Image (cartoon, rainbow, N blue to C red):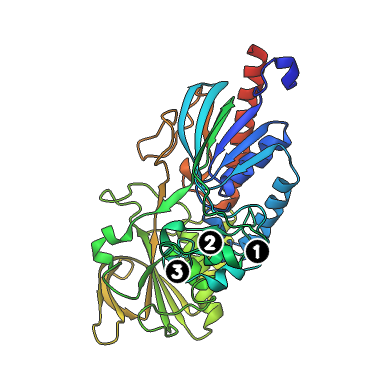
Amino acid sequence: MTQEASGKPDAKKVLVIGGGVAGITAAIEAAEAGCQVVLVEKAPSLGGRVARMNQYFPKLCPPACGLEINFKRMKSNPGIQVLTQAEVQDLAGSPGDYTATVKVSPRYVTDACTQCGECVKVCPAERSSEFDYGMGKTKAVYLPQANAFPALYALEREACPAGCDLCVKACAYGAIDLNQKAETQTFSASAVIAATGWVPYDASKITNLGYGRCANVVTNVLMERLASVSGPTQGKILRPSDGKEPKTVAFVQCAGSRDENHLPYCSAVCCSASLKQATYVRSAYPEAKVKIFYIDIRTPGRLEDFYAKVGADPLVELIKGKVAKVEEDPATKDVILEVEDVLHGKKITERVDLLVLAAGIVPQTQGLPAAATLDEFGFVDNRPGKTGFYGAGCVRRPEEVSATVQDATGAALKALQCAVRSAHHG
C-alpha cells in the first residue's frame, strides 16, 4: 500500500538501531523492499566490529570489500537516512505506531569535508583510538576508519586544548564548525530493528588467564587489529611488551564462554576465529609454532573443512585441555601456561611468546528501549507472536558474519510485514 493510500505518512518507516553489518543489511533490505528507513549509529561511521576485522573466515578475504558494496547500495537508495553519533533516547508507542526520540551529538565537521587531511597536520592533541581498542592513538580530529561511511572526519572536542582553533584555520573548505550543538530529532515508525551488536567479554575478569596482568596476553579482538594493515602495528603481529616478532603463539579457547562464573553459553564463533588467527601467524611468520588449547572445537557445516585445513598444518597443534593458570616470566615477559592435557591425562607447562584469549561475545543491549525483550542470557529475544520490535545479529545470538546477514534480512522482512499490517489497519 502506498503512503498516500494508507493515510499515514510514516506507515512504512522502519527504525534501525545500530550501524554494524546487521544494521546495514537490515536497512538496505527494508529500503529496497519499499520502506523508508532511519538508521541510527552511535559511532561516527558505519561498519561496527566487522570493519575492525582483518579477514573473514573461511575465505580469508578482507571485510572492506563487502562493506564497500553495501555502502554503495546505501548511497544509491534515497529511502535510507543515516544518523551517526546518534542514540535513541526514548521509544514510545506500540507496533505499527512508534515514536522515537534520537539525540544526535555534534561531529564538529560538516558535509563540506573533502578528507584533505590539512586539519590533522596542525592538530596538537591526541585521543585514544577506540577503533584499535585503545592500542593506538589518533589526532583529536580524525578519520574514523580508512573506508569511513559517511566519508567525513570527526572531532573529539574533549581532547582539544582550551581555545584551540588551528583545525578551523587550516581547513580551506570551511568544513569545521566548533559551534555545533547536540540536537534532538523525533521520528515515527511502524517497526524497530535492534542491531546493536556485541562487546567482547572483559577478559580481565578471568583472573587465572593473565589478561591485564601479563604484558603479552591479548584478546582475539586485539589480535584482529594487530594483524590488520590499518591497525596500530601496520599489520605486523608483534609482542606488546617489546615489539618483537613472536616465534610461539598460543590460543586459549572459551575464555569466559561456557563457564557458569562468566558466560554460561557458547559464543559460537571463537573456535573459527582462533583457527583464522592461527593462519595470520603462520602467514606472517612461516617458522612460527601455534598451539590451540580447547575444550571442544565447534566448527559446524562448511567450517569443518576450514578446521581440517588449518589442523593439517604441521606447525599448528590442537591440544584438548583446560588452561589452569597463566603467569609471566619477569625477565623475558614470556607467557607460561599450566594446562591439563585431557587426552594424555597429564598436566603440562608451555612457554610462549604471545598468548591470545578467545574472549566471548556479550550482547550490546545497554541503552536499548524498554520494548526489547531479553532472554536468560541477556540477548534480545524475538519471541513467537511478538511483533514490532526485532533483534538482528549478535545482539540476538552469537553468530558469524554470514549468519548475521541472513538474520538481519529476516528481521527486515518481519519489519516490512509489521509495516504493511499497520498500513492496512491504519
Q: Nearer the viewer, residue 184 or 80?
A: 184
Decide which of tag 3 and tag 1 comes sooner along the chain: 1
The secondary element bearing badge 3 is classed as: loop
Q: Which mark is residue 52?
A: 2
Q: Position of residue 95 (x, y in %)?
A: 54, 21
| Residue 91 position in % (x across, y down) | 47, 28
For residue 115, which numbered disc appears in the image?
A: 1
Inter-mark Cα distance, 1 to 2: 20 Å
Measured from the top left, where is residue 7 in percent x and y? Answer: 69, 15
Q: Amino acid at mark 2?
A: Arg
Q: Nearer the viewer, mark 3 or mark 1?
A: 3
Camera-nearest label, 1 or 2: 1
At x 36%, y 40%, the residue is 377
The local crowd at label 3, few if under 14, some if 14 to 19, many if 20 or more residues have their Cα within 10 Å, is some
Report if residue 279 is visible in the image: no
Query: Mark 2, mark 3: which one is toward the viewer?
Result: 3
Tell me the residue that label 3 is attached to. Answer: 125
